[in-house]
Amino acid sequence: MRFDSALGLEAKKGPLATTGKVLVYSVMVLVFTGPLVGLLVSAFSKTLDPTSFSLWPDEFTLENFTQAADKNVYLYLFNSFVVVGFGLALQMIVSVFAAYSLARKKFRGMTFVMLIMLATMMLPEEIIAIPLSLVLADMPLIHANLINSYAGMILPVGAWGFSILVMTEFMKEVPVELEEAARIDGAGELRTFFTIILPLCKPALGVIGVFGFTMIWDQYLLPLIVANESSHWTLPIALRSLRSDEEVGIGILLAASLLALLPSVIAFLAFQRQFMRGLTSGAIKG
Amino acid sequence: MTTTLERPSQRTEPRRRPGRGRWRGTAVAWLFLAPALILFLYFKFIPMFEGLRMSFFKVQPFLGDEWVGLDNYATIMSDDAFVSAVWHSVLLAVGTTVGSLVLGLALALLIEGPARYLWFVRTAAFLPVVTTMAAVAEVWRIMYHPGDTGLLNSILGWVAIEPQPFLASEDTSLWSIMGMSIWRGTPYDMMIFLAGLVGIDRTLYEAAAVDGASTWSRLRHITLPALRPVFWILFTLAAIRGLRVFVEVYVLTNGGPNGSSEVLMTLIYKLGFQRSELGIAAAGGIVLFVATLVLTVSVQLMRRRQAS
C-alpha cells in the first residue's frame, strides 16, 4: 500500500468515494471563493436593492464603475497606488541593505540589532497607534508634520522585520567566494553589493516583494490616523464613506470594494510560488 | 618589520587588514543598517516609549501634560466598557483561533496530496487570506444583511432556518464577526498544516498500514504528534492576532450594537481619536501589550514543558 497523504484518500476509488470527494471539494471552493465571486458579479450588475447580493449576474453594466468616479473612488485608488508603490520600493531597498549587513558582516552589536528586529515583529502596530499619531504630527528632532501627507503613510511601512529577516536568511546562502573574488578584482563595497549579491537574491526579492505588497495594500489603521482629509484617503479606508450613501445603492461600494481587493489577489496569483515559500519559511521560523 | 609580519594574515584574509580595515567594515555594516534602524526608531520605538510615558500623564496637546501616576490605569481598569471589551477580545481571539485551527487541520487532511486538481482547490481556498480586509468586511456586511433577503439568510431559508439578525443584534454580533474571521483564518492555518504534513515520513504510514493500524490510529499516533510544533506556532500567532483585532470589528459593527462587539482596539481608538482621552487610551495600549507579552511567554513555557 502506498501513501501520498495522511488519510490516503487518493487511493480510494469507486463511485461513492469519487462523489464524496467532488462534493467536499466543491463545497470548499464555494465557501471560500463564493463571497469573492459574488462581489465580482455584483459589481458589474445593476443592483438597486441595497440588500441583494447574488452569485448570478443580473444585467451586465459598467455603471457602478462610472458612477464611482463622481465619488472620487479613482482618486483613492491613485492614493493607494502611490503609497504602495513608494512604500514597497522603500521597504525593499531598506530590507536588502539591512540584510546585507546582517548576513555578510561581522560587527560588534550584531546580536543587539537582531534583537531589535525581532522586537519590532513582536510589537503589534495597533498598540502604538495613539502615540504614533502624535509622533507623526510632530516628528522628534526634525519637527515635521506628516499628518495628511503621503510620507506619513509611506515611511512607517519602510522598515519591516519580516522582510529583513527573510532577506537575511537568503543572503547567508550566497557563497562568500563570489564576493571575495569581486573584491580581489578591485570592486568596492557598493559595486559588489549591486553586481554580485543582489542579482543572486532575485528569488528572495520576489518573496519580500509580494509579501510587502499585500502588507502595505492591506494597511488600514495607519492611513486612518494619517489621512484626516479625504484628499489623502486610500481606497480601503474610503470604503466606509461610500456605503452610507443611500441614494445610489450599494453599486459604488461594490465596485470600489472590488478595486480594493483585486490588486492583492492578482499579486498573489502572479507570484504564488514566492508567496507560498515566504509563508512557510516565515511561519516555521516564527 | 611590522609590514613583513602582517603579510601572512593578509594572504589568508585579503579583505580584512587589522586595525583600519576592521573599523571600516564595522562602519560599512552600520551604514547599511542605518535606514532600517532610523525608521524603526521613529515609527516603532519612539511611539512605544511615548505611549508608555503618556500612560502616566493627563495628555493635553496645547496645555502641557500633567503627571497623574497610575490614575489612567485605575480609570481604565475600573471602566465597565473596558472590562467587557477585554472579555469580547478574549472570546473573539479564542473562538477565531480554535475555529480556524480545527477547520484548518480538517481541511488540510482532506486536500493533502500531489494531484493537480487538489492544487486548484488549495489555491482557490487560500484566496480569502490575501484579500484586503476592509473590502472583504464590506462584502460580509452585505451578506450578513438581517432582512430575509440577505444572502446568508436566503441560504438559511433553504434549510428552513429563520432569518438571523447577525450583526444587528447584541446577542449575535460578536459571533458573526467570529464567523468572518474564521473564514479568513482557516485557509492560512490549512496551508501551514499542509506544509507540515508534507514533511512527515511516508514510510511510517506504510509501516502502520502493514501492521494493520486503522486510519484513526495512524492519525493519532503519527500525523498529529508530527504536527505539534506547527500547531503551537499557529496558536501563538492567531491568539496574538485575535487580541489586537481592529479592522474586522471597526468595519462590520464598530463595536455595536450597544457595545456588544466592542473590542480592546476599537475602544482604544475611540478613546484616543474621538474622545481625546489620549493618556487613558495609551494606558489601554500598554495593557494590551502586556497581555500579548504574557500570552506569548506562557505559550512558549507550556511548549517547553511539554517538550521536555
Image (cartoon, rainbow, N blue to C red):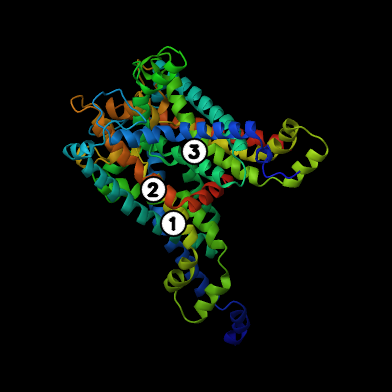
Local secondary structure at mark 2:
helix
Local secondary structure at mark 3:
helix
The residue pinned by badge 1 equals: A95
User: Relative to the observer, which residue lies in front, A150 or A123?
Assistant: A150
User: Relative to the observer, which residue lies in front, A285 or B105?
Assistant: B105
The residue pinned by badge 2 equals: A266
- Chain of the residue where label 2 is placed in the rendered structure: A
Viewport quadrant of the N terminus of chain B: bottom right
Q: Which-is-in-front pick, marks 1 and 2?
A: 2
Which amino acid, by three-letter code, is at mark 2? Ile
Residue B74 position in % (x across, y down): 42, 21
Direction front: furthest residue: A15
The residue pinned by badge 3 equals: B125
Q: Is residue B18 rendered to the left or right of residue A160?
A: right
- Chain of the residue where label 3 is placed in the rendered structure: B
Which amino acid, by three-letter code, is at mark 3? Ala
Which amino acid, by three-letter code, is at mark 1? Ser
User: Label 3: few (<14), some or many (≥20) within 10 Å?
Assistant: many
Is A282 rendered above or below residue B215? below
Q: Can residue B77 be seen in this view?
A: no
Q: Residue at x 51, y 44 (%)?
A: B120
Mark 3–mark 1 Cα distance, whole angstroms, equals 31 Å
Residue A13 position in % (x across, y down): 67, 37
Q: Is residue B203 rendered to the left or right of residue A174?
A: right
Residue A74 in which image quadrant: top left
Q: Which residue is drawn at 55% across and 64% down?
A: A106
